[in-house]
Amino acid sequence: MTDLAARLFAMDVMAMLVEGGGELHASFVEAKLVDRLAVFIAPRLIGGAVAPTAVGGRGLALPEALRLESPSVRSVGDDWLIEGDVCPPGAEG
């Protein structure tokens, strides 16, 4: 994953859209390759211990949590779009 990012950067690619499931998202978070987030939230609650989450993997403890700086929220059809720049843990925003 970091090799792919390095190769793209060497080709002057400065951004990529990662669309996938929780495990793919977790891989990018764990590799510290996330600097902006856009997430759609549907007005449906499914819950349960086996419900899929937006970020899988080992997860992050609250002190390690990534925070969005100046997030924006807007409706898109029936869903909500939340966007913002990612602040690493401990960064002031």
Image (tube, rainbow, N blue to C red):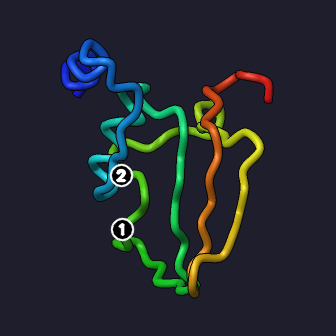
Residue at 34 percent across and 72 percent down: it is 50
Quarter of the image for residue 8 reads top left
Q: Position of residue 53 (x, y in %)?
A: 41, 63
Q: Amino acid at mark 1?
A: Pro
Q: CA distance from mark 1 to mark 2?
A: 8 Å
Q: Residues within 10 Å of mark 1 (few under 14, many from 20)?
A: few
Q: Position of residue 85 (x, y in %)?
A: 63, 38
Query: Which secondary structure lies at badge 1?
Result: loop
Residue 43 as seen in the image, left or right of residue 50: right
Query: In this orientation, which residue lies closer to the viewer: 63 or 84?
Result: 84
Q: Position of residue 1 (x, y in %)?
A: 22, 28
Position of 6 relative to 13 (above/below): above
How many marks can you see? 2
Query: Which secondary structure lies at badge 2?
Result: loop
Quarter of the image for residue 89 reads top right
Q: Which residue in the protein does label 2 denote?
A: 56
Q: Which residue in the protein does label 1 denote?
A: 52
Instruction: Tell me, yes or no, whether the two marked residues, 1 and 2, touch with CB atoms within 8 Å.
Output: yes
Residue pushed farthest front?
Answer: 12
Residue at 33 percent across and 25 percent down: it is 13
Q: Amino acid at mark 2?
A: Gly
